[in-house]
Image (cartoon, rainbow, N blue to C red):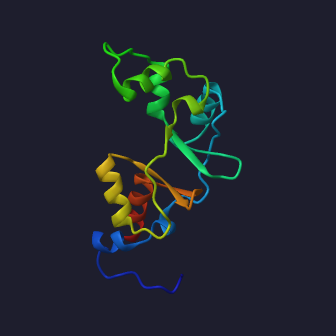
Amino acid sequence: MPNAKRPAGPTSPRKLMEIKVGEVMNKRPQVVHEDTSIEGLIERMVGQIQECFPVVDKDFRLLGIVTESDLFQVLYPQLPSETVGSTKIREVLKYSAKTVGDIMTRRPITATPGMSLREAMGLMAAHKLRRLPVVEGERLVGLLSLRDIIELYRIIR
């Protein structure tokens, strides 16, 4: 919009919070599949700026998400002194991981395109997340990151 006037002063964070996720999200995030090898994931992470990848099936349904932290646990295994509970068992299984499906987080916290940034950032804060897959139904339509929000704020302030 070349003729649009910018506000006289900085945009308040309040206005930023009302913007919809669909306007800010990366609409074409790089994705991987459950059967992607750990070596293949490493190659993708080295070649991309993205620090995480949504995991999708052939119909682009979101199955999970895999992050640098998940990969770190494969590269630097530290067996817990006690193996109790499903979380500890999952950590032990990561040590022998062969594919993305072995290390991904299943059923990740998600956002929708119609959600406000306030709502999405509330989810991010509550669950200590830096990224949210964006879905319509079960289908991945984007990825929202803290970096996207910060860049938007820098542009509109």
Eyeballing the image, is 68 above or below 17? above
Q: Residue furthest right?
A: 58
The percent position of residue 123, horizontal first and vertical second, equals 35, 55
How many labels were placed on the picture?
0
- Between 78 and 47, the one lying in front of the other is 78
Q: Please give the name of the residue rendered at 63% of the width and 41% of the height, measured from the top-left corner.
A: 32
Q: Is residue 157 visible?
A: no
Pick the quarter of the image with the N terminus.
bottom right
The percent position of residue 25, horizontal first and vertical second, equals 50, 61
Q: Please give the name of the residue rendered at 39% of the width and 15% of the height, measured from the top-left corner.
A: 78
Pick the quarter of the image with the C terminus.
bottom left
The percent position of residue 87, horizontal first and vertical second, equals 38, 29
* 136 relative to 152 in the view: left or right: right
The percent position of residue 13, horizontal first and vertical second, equals 29, 69
Eyeballing the image, is 20 above or below 125? below
Q: Where on the picture, by quarter, is residue 138? A: bottom right
* 27 relative to 82 in the view: left or right: right
* 31 relative to 50 in the view: left or right: right
- Between 148 and 136, the one lying in front of the other is 136
Q: Please give the name of the residue rendered at 32% of the width and 46% of the height, measured from the top-left corner.
A: 128
Q: Please give the name of the residue rendered at 43% of the width and 68% of the height, measured from the top-left corner.
A: 115
Q: Is residue 130 visible?
A: yes
Q: Where on the picture, by quarter, is residue 19? A: bottom left
